[in-house]
Amino acid sequence: MDSARTLVAVIEDDPGIRELVTDLLQREGFEVHAFADAGSFFRSASTERIDCLILDVMLPGEDGLSICRTLRAARPRLPILMVSARGDDVDRIIGLEVGADDYLAKPFNARELLARVRAALRRMRADSGAAEGEHRGAFRFIGWTLSAANRSLTAPSGDIVSLTGGEFDLLLALVSHPQRVVTRDQLLDWTRGRAATPFDRAVDVQLSRLRRKIGDDPREPALIRTVRGDGYMFAVPVVRC
């Protein structure tokens, strides 16, 4: 990955943490624009060209959850990594539910933060990895079309369904292995790589969001079935084009 042209924005009100993260990323060759609050971020001319956002949850004024919702609507594929002093499962799930791709609790290890940023960027750049290079066509199932080439999902109605980067990668992993049970650990490895942890809840939350977006009843899912004790199965036939 050529990080020299990669712009990472940091929204963090703690000046010490903001400086630490900025220095870390700059030493690794990233361009970094740092902000103390939502207002200064949205007034910045760089908002539209950032490649990744590191976002504190608890900010003065508009909080990180609200910022995430706003950006998700405008830029569904932007990698967003949330950081917060509140690290229990409920807070992680809320962050992921509003559209964050990843969530890291404070205090965090600086190298882990860097690893997660790099992993998020790799997931976003479909042409950057050998594994993704194997998936250049489209996958069709019961009227839906998932295009790996332009990372889009088209509904049977012809409408484009907005997916986050994590949701797209999860669906791509599932349709690439149709009618076959895949474990949660396999999905973590395929979609999150070395940035995943054994207790990573991102797959669970993104799977729930994905089911809603493709109209799969979470009480009796027909497309993405839960195989109790084993994992998940994309249950309908898939045609690869």
Image (tube, grey):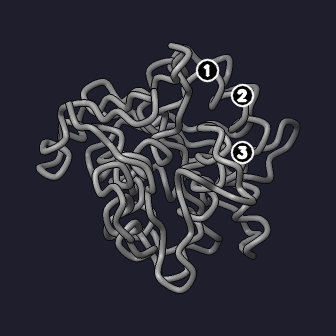
Q: CA distance from mark 2 to mark 3?
A: 10 Å
- As drawn, the residue found furthest toward the bottom would be 229
Q: Decide: marks 2, 3 in contact (CB < 8 A)?
A: no
Mark 3 secondary-structure assignment: loop
In the image, which disc is placed on residue 177? none
- Looking at the picture, which amino acid does disc 3 mark? Val
10 Å crowding of disc 3: few (<14), some (14-19), many (20+): some
Secondary structure under the numbered disc 1 in the rendered image: helix
Q: Which of these two is toward me, 39 or 147? A: 147
Asked whether 3 or 138 is in front, the reply is 138
Which residue is pictured at 52% across the width and 24% down the height?
155
Which residue is at a point 71% across and 73% down the rendered structure image?
87
Q: Is residue 147 visible?
A: yes
* Tally of numbered tags: 3
User: Is tag 3's residue or tag 1's residue first in the polypeptide sequence?
Assistant: 1
Asked if labels 2 and 1 touch by Cβ distance under 8 angstroms, the answer is yes
Residue 74 image label: 1
